[in-house]
Image (spheres, rainbow, N blue to C red):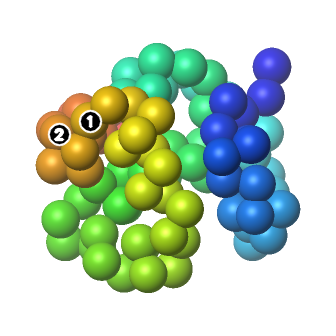
Amino acid sequence: MGCSLTKELKEEHDTMKNPKLAGVIHTCPVIGKQICLWCCLHIADAADPMSRNNMLDKYPNLVKVEEISGRDFDSIWETCSRCHVRA
């Protein structure tokens, strides 16, 4: 099974600098589906209030995660900041 965000973040998946991160798959508690480690780390950075603006400037398609999850980035950060995958 691959990353469930491949269609929504196609450009990002096609141009990622470290494609090995795409091979590490886990179930995301925010999305509730399987995502790659690249998406996980970048969603967490977009949700983090300290890095949000830079991350969204660099990857504007990450705003789709709010729609997909039905949560805003502040709410997503509550989950990402405690997630065991990032630790």
Q: Left or right: 3 with respect to 54?
A: right
Does the image show residue 81?
A: no
Q: Amino acid at mark 2?
A: Ser
Near-viewer residue (78 or 63): 63
63 vs 71, left or right, is right
Marks 1 and 2 sit apart, C-alpha to C-alpha, by 6 Å
Residue 55: numbered disc = none
Q: Secondary structure at mark 2?
A: helix
The residue depicted at 42 percent of the width and 57 percent of the height is 63
Graded by Cα atoms within 10 Å as few (under 14), some (14 to 19) or many (20 or more), the crowding at tag 1 reads: some
Per the image, the residue denoted by label 1 is 71
Q: Which numbered mark, 1 or 2, is in the foreground of this view?
A: 1
Amino acid type, mark 1: Arg
Secondary structure state at the residue bearing disc 1: loop
Left/right placement of residue 12 relative to residue 46 reads right
Question: Marks 2 and 1: in contact by CB < 8 Å?
Answer: yes
Q: Which residue is mark 2?
A: 75
Residue 31 location (% of width, % of height): 45, 27
In this rendering, position of residue 29 left or right of residue 74? right
